[in-house]
Amino acid sequence: MRLEVRRGGLEEPETIALLTAHLDEMKRLSPPGSLHALDMNELTAPAVEFWTVWDETELLGCGALKSLGDQQCEIKSMHTAKGHRGKGVGVEILRFLIDEARRHEFTRISLETGSVGAYAPARALYSKSGFVVCGPFADYRHDPHSIYMTLELGDPSISIAD
């Protein structure tokens, strides 16, 4: 598999379909008031950068960074297409997002993910990659359906585990 990361792509039919599937899955797994995924309009906000990951003409996944100010950013809309889960696509997306955060000189990258079992693979990936559980950040509030994680980016030797 040869992965290519492309900036943007929110107008692409494949991206729209992937994000629709992502939001549908998040709605199914998260009760009302606990859904924190960005919709298509929110992904075009000036504080958000969005990328897609392709293998030639096949869309494998996507991810975004949202600037929170004060040298901090948040991972948003990180999603791997169902047929490509467990193949290392998520690792590559995460690695790319962390590299981009460093390139933009962010010192901390944080995220919110679900607390139910369906999110266990994502939580394992983040933990294996050095993220640690933290309290709510930015505009988040305590929510039993959410787990908040963060990674300090000050050490450039931190590498993302495969």
Image (spheres, grey):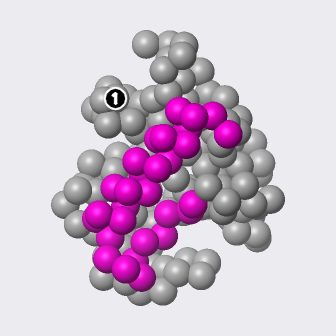
Which secondary structure, mark 1? helix
> Furthest-front residue in view?
13
Q: 109 or 32: which is nearer to us?
A: 32
Q: Is residue 93 left or right of residue 101?
A: left
- State the quadrant of the N terminus: top left
Tell me, yes or no, if residue 101 can be seen here: no
Q: 56 or 40: which is nearer to us?
A: 40
Tell me, yes or no, if residue 116 can be seen here: yes
| Magenta stretch holds residue 36 | yes
> x, y (%) of residue 140?
52, 81
Q: Residue at x 27, y 48 (%)?
A: 121
Amino acid type, callout 1: His
Q: Residue at x 43, y 57 (%)?
A: 23
What segment carries the magenta color?
Answer: 11-39
Q: Residue at x 62, y 27 (%)?
A: 5
Q: Dot 1 corresponds to which residue?
A: 84
> x, y (%) of residue 48?
71, 56
Vertical relation: 103 (above or below) 28 = above
